[in-house]
Image (cartoon, helix red, strand yellow):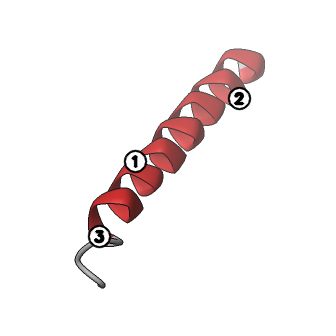
Amino acid sequence: MSFMRYDVIIKVFSFSLSEINIYSLFLQPLGL
């Protein structure tokens, strides 16, 4: 159970990291 929960945390963490990358790519040209 803990292993599955850990796997979900890793997936959510990597997804949030990719979201931050996408947001930074969009915000960089705007100078924000």
Establish if 30 lies above or below 4. Answer: below
Q: Position of residue 11 (x, y in %)?
A: 57, 28
Q: Position of residue 8 (x, y in %)?
A: 58, 25
Name the residue: 30% across, 84% down: 31
Few, some or many C-alpha atoms within 10 Å of disc 1 (few <14, some 14-19, many ≥20)?
Answer: few
Name the residue: 65% across, 33% down: 10
Q: Position of residue 28 (x, y in %)?
A: 35, 72
Inspect the image, locate mark 2, and give the three-letter code of the amino acid beneath it.
Tyr
Question: Which part of the image, by quadrant, shows the C terminus?
Answer: bottom left
Does label 2 or label 3 sit earlier along the sequence? 2
State how far apart marks 2 and 1 are (Cα). 20 Å
Few, some or many C-alpha atoms within 10 Å of disc 2 (few <14, some 14-19, many ≥20)?
Answer: few
Provide the residue designation for mark 3. 27
Establish if 11 lies above or below 26. Answer: above
Please name which of the two marks, 2 or 1, marks the residue nearer to the observer.
1
Provide the residue designation for mark 2. 6
Mark 1 in CB contact with mark 3 (< 8 angstroms): no
Element type at marker 3? helix
Please name which of the two marks, 1 or 3, marks the residue nearer to the observer.
3
Question: Left or right: 27 with respect to 9?
Answer: left
State how far apart marks 2 and 3 are (Cα). 31 Å
Q: Quadrant of residue 27?
A: bottom left
Q: Position of residue 19 (x, y in %)?
A: 40, 47
Does label 2 or label 1 sit earlier along the sequence? 2
Inspect the image, locate mark 1, and give the three-letter code of the amino acid beneath it.
Glu
Question: Which part of the image, by quadrant, shows the N terminus?
Answer: top right
Provide the residue designation for mark 1. 19
